[in-house]
Amino acid sequence: MPKIDFDNVDDVQDFSPIPDGKYLCRVAEVEEATTQYGDEMWKLRLVVESGPHRGRYIFDNMVFSEAALKRIKLICSRLGLIVSGELDLKPSVIKGRTCYVTVETEEYEDHEGRTKRRNVVPFAGYDR
């Protein structure tokens, strides 16, 4: 059996949704991925920077499909990027930037048929 020193193991984080609202967030991580349709996608991990929910995470995606480019432009502009002309967009360009992010709570059914709740960012849920 393995020997574990639990003094060096963090407690379980609270994964319940945070209340609906607008939060000042920083882009903490950007993971590059691909959608099931083959489009490039960035998985964003946004950390709440202030208030009673400071340190909690909000998750969102940026999908680089033709249909989603308006949202990409909106997110980039709200993160303080200049969105005229061409932009060589890399994860490092947005990582560490801050803006306000609106979250809402939605219910969904997991793979075992249980109803659960999670936070989602609406289409235009980013604000400077």
Image: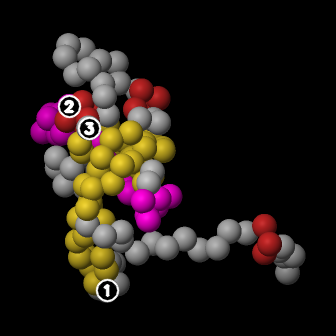
Residue at 30%, 65% (x, y): give it.
Answer: 119
Residue 128's label in the rendered image is 3
Q: Amino acid at mark 2?
A: Lys
Label 3 sits on what residue type? Arg
Can you tell which of label 2 and label 1 is closer to the viewer? 2
Residue 55 showing in the rendered view: yes
Q: State the separation of the CA atoms marked 2 and 1.
A: 36 Å
In the displayed structure, 88 sits above or below 39; it is: above
Element class at badge 2 = helix
Q: Name the spot of residue 56 as percent of width and height, x first.
A: 46, 61
Coordinates of residue 50 in the picture (x, y in percent): 44, 54
Looking at the image, residue 90 sits to the left or right of residue 126; the answer is right
Q: Position of residue 43 (x, y in %)?
A: 38, 47
**Magenta-highlighted residues:** 51-73
Q: Residue at x 68, y 68 (%)?
A: 10
Residue density around tag 2, few if under 14, some if 14–19, many if 20 or more, within 10 Å: some
Residue type at tag 1: Arg
Label 3: state its secondary structure.
loop
Magenta region includes residue 66:
yes
Can the viewer see residue 35? Answer: no
Residue at (19%, 55%) from the top-left corner? Answer: 122
- Magenta-colored stretch includes residue 117: no
Q: Which residue is mark 1?
A: 114
Residue 73 numbered mark, or none: 2
- Side of 87 relative to 93 (left or right): left
Q: Which of the image's four quarters has the N terminus?
A: bottom right
In front of the other: 51 or 43: 51
Residue 54: x %, y % from top left: 47, 59
Q: Earlier in the sequence, mark 2 or mark 1?
A: 2
Q: CA distance from mark 3 to mark 2?
A: 13 Å
Please say if the residues under marks 3 and 2 sit with CB atoms less than 8 Å apart: no
Q: How far apart in space, not on screen, are marks 1 and 3 (Cα)?
A: 37 Å
